[in-house]
Amino acid sequence: MAKFTLKINGQTHRVDVDPSTPMLWVLRDHLDMPGTKYGCGVAACGACTIHLDGSAVRACQLPVSTVKNQEITTIEGLSASGDHPVQRAWLEHDVAQCGYCQAGQIMSAASLLKINPNPTDDDIDAFMSGNICRCGTYLRIKAAIKTAAQQS
Amino acid sequence: MENNATTYSRRSFLKVTSLTGGGMMLGIHWLAGAAPSAAETGLDVVKETFSFNGHIKITSDNIIQIMAQNPEFGQNVKTSLPMIVAEELDADWKNVVVEQAAFDLKLYTRQFAGGSQSVRTTWKALRNAGASARHMLREAAAKTWGVPLDEVTTNAGVLLHEKTGKSVTYGEMASAAAEIPVPTDVKLKDLKDFKIVRSPRKNVDGLNIVTGKPMFGLDYRQKDMLIAMIQHPPAFGLKLKSYDAKQALKMPGIKHVFTIKLFPDKYERQIFDTRTFNEALVVVGKSTWEVMNARKKLKVEWEPITEKVECVHSFGSERDEITPAGLESTDQHFAKMAERAAQSANELRKDGDPEAAFKNAAFILERTYSAPFLAHNTMEPMNCFAHVTESKAFFAGPLQAPEFAEKSLAERFGMPLEQVEIQMTRMGGGFGRRAYAHYMLEAGLISQRAKAPIKLVYSREDDMTYGIYRPAYTATYRAALDANKQLIGFHVKGGGIPEHPIAADRFPASAVDNYLAEGWEIPSNLTIGAFRAPRSNFNAAAEQSFLDELAETMGKDPIDLRLEMLQRAKDKPVGKHDNYDPDRYAGVLKLVREKSGWDLPENKGKNRGVAAYFCHNSYAAHVIDLTIKDGEPVVEQVYSAVDCGIVINPDAAANMVEGAVVDGIGNALYGALTVKDGVPEQNNLNTYRIIRHHEAPKKVDVHFVQNDIDPTGLGEPPFPPVFAALANALYRATGKRLYKQPFGVKSVE
């Protein structure tokens, strides 16, 4: 066990955990922030996507000991009240079915638009391919990303 | 208007003081149609709440609370069922707050997500619930104002008396309405007056989802809760022999290692009691990561199972189910199925003289189709919170069938039903997998043994390799043609491991003079269960591919052939004919023909395939257009036509169909769970291929047949015909017929 100080969603958090613990489980089990989802544990589904210094990473592959001073943003901190352009676009297109993967999809989409404010269909496919939606809402996700691109 | 007897036999008024007493994990509820800040503000001033029935509560400050009675796993019932109540109540949707109902069969019927039945089976009861409350509000207003009841009307949550100009909100009249007896019968709205049903309404949990609020089973937690995981045998056909937990118990955070036995010997199983392994080795600790790590330190010896026979009860019937010993492999499964298919099978339906038709045929088309086991791979792996004490068994988790689970749990824990409490969390997908509540039983037994509240968590590997899979199937279709290439006989013989898929009375039964359907089965120790449109998902793939090839053989357009057969089933049906409505079946084919421009010259050169199917009370047809790029199919466009009667929430319904199309394409191209020596060869999402963004169709156009027929479901019916529409389009693109799922990409090279 070791003590870590983490900057998450603009706040400082302290945890005492095994250094190998992935951020996914630090968030979910130790900090009561379950918006970041467990889907596979091997970076194959994207459900646990968070931002590390603004870039999308899979929290299941990010040991807490490697985070150090980098800023973490989770779905809970993407906006104050669900008004990030990507979140608004998701609501406008009523994207979700079961909803489980959507936090990860949204975090990936927000990261994509930061890098590429006007992505083409191919850009979206390439960037978002790591995020599985088992309900098959891919068409709405793509439409929502385009709407968000226009609004941000 | 339609008169309807109400289902409420006695008054159930309840005056409560707060909206937030529903026992949900979330303390905050959002108004369905309004911004969250407005909703939160609204809730701050809640004074009194009046309950009209199990579905409706109205506050003095005019918030309409509607309970969502069925479990939600993405099929939109948490929004669409309350829409039905709100419609008959004539509420203003902006003022509606939806809350997930607790599992309570005294208040609700059929709290079950499965079989595409949620809307169909609750439609009348929900309309009655809304109409009863509206009637009581009107009667209260008539009394208060001293005017005849007939003169009191409503409009979007407001009671009106035109002659005097009086009007009040439902909230203002709720207190007086609570004194009115529940009407014995009520008038329902004319469909033409619908304002909420049939117009798109956003998902009531939309904001919770996009902001990552805890809603799912895996998000559930209680103070001092422990985490449990199961170490299951590495292969089907093995069981626990012995274990050494010394090292595991030394790992940080670990509290217990023990075994549990799910059912006692000679237990007579109910259909949804399916479980893969009856004995489970369990690790319990403080956090998920610690338990995952400790589990790796277990030293376990496994041994082969012996054959067992269990009595299984299924909706009133019972049968003996054999679980054979041995380590099975997929190659061996398909070899065995081929061998078994050559032998005689059970006759399921016979019309006319099929033997003579095939004997006299000028030409026989015979094709064999097969499909592998499929894993559900819900995005949220199986899990359940349980706290079992001597006096109570409490569960919170994602499950489709609480009614079945409750009975089995009560029996297993030796408690009356009243002592078993189940809270239904939102499910991160279901697809049939969560109808099997073995994970709840496991969680309960672990909690009982650990004497603590626990959450059982399946890793993705556990979830995929310890599954209740879609069975492996094969079927041979034969068509007898006379010298004029007319269809004179049809024969399907299907089987599977461990069940056959054949639905003998479905189309094309009744459409052919001489018809034979047969089935056979081979037992297995792999556990199987419902998977989105059970059996239909295979039948449609095979039958609708066969009809495409048959049409080509007969020199007919594939839609024309189907329409001719349906016309025959309508005009002069052969044998028993109560399974499908030929007009509605033809209706979706005609609609998809029109919307896809099937007959337009400019579309003739496209690689397009068509398929249709009827199952779970709704009709669906798809046309798929695709191209081939670098040997891979690119689905350019899908046209879908669906007849599910009245469409409650059109945009969400379209979302369901789009999702079914994506899911169907994905499973047809890639879906497979294979085993070698009893070990699943795929154990995570990096080895089990699921359709991804870049493989999804570029466009899906969804169209609904417009009619006033009582609504039926949508979760399953659009799924089965996707497989064949894809196979038929791939044939046009590649010249190759596809008989074996998954189609993969090699087949189209």
Image: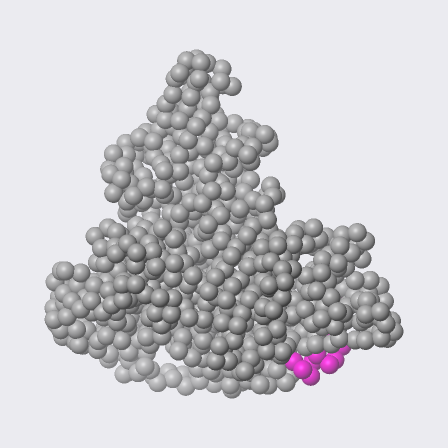
Residue at 25% in and 34% down: B45
Residue at 73% in and 62% down: B561
Residue B522 as seen in the image, left or right of residue B17: right
Name of the residue lying farthest toward the front: B602
Compared with residue B540, is residue B84 higher up or lower down, i.e. above or below? above
Seen from the viewer's position, the closer of residues A74 and B523 is A74
Residue at 34% in and 60% down: A145
Seen from the viewer's position, the closer of residues B326 and A70 is A70
Quadrant of residue B457 within the rendered picture: bottom left
Indicate the position of residue B329 as horizontal and vertical percent values.
55, 84
Seen from the viewer's position, the closer of residues B700 and B59 is B700
The image quadrant where one finds the N terminus of chain B is: top right
Indicate the position of residue B372 as horizontal and vertical percent values.
56, 76
Compared with residue B266, is residue B573 higher up or lower down, i.e. above or below? above
Residue B113 as seen in the image, left or right of residue B523: left
Residue B11 falls inside the magenta stretch: no
- Residue interval drawn in magenta: B337-348
Residue B340 falls inside the magenta stretch: yes
Indicate the position of residue B318 as horizontal and vertical percent values.
64, 63
Indicate the position of residue B233 as horizontal and vertical percent values.
44, 80
Seen from the viewer's position, the closer of residues B196 and B249 is B196
Residue at 85% in and 75% down: B362
The image quadrant where one finds the C terminus of chain B is: bottom right
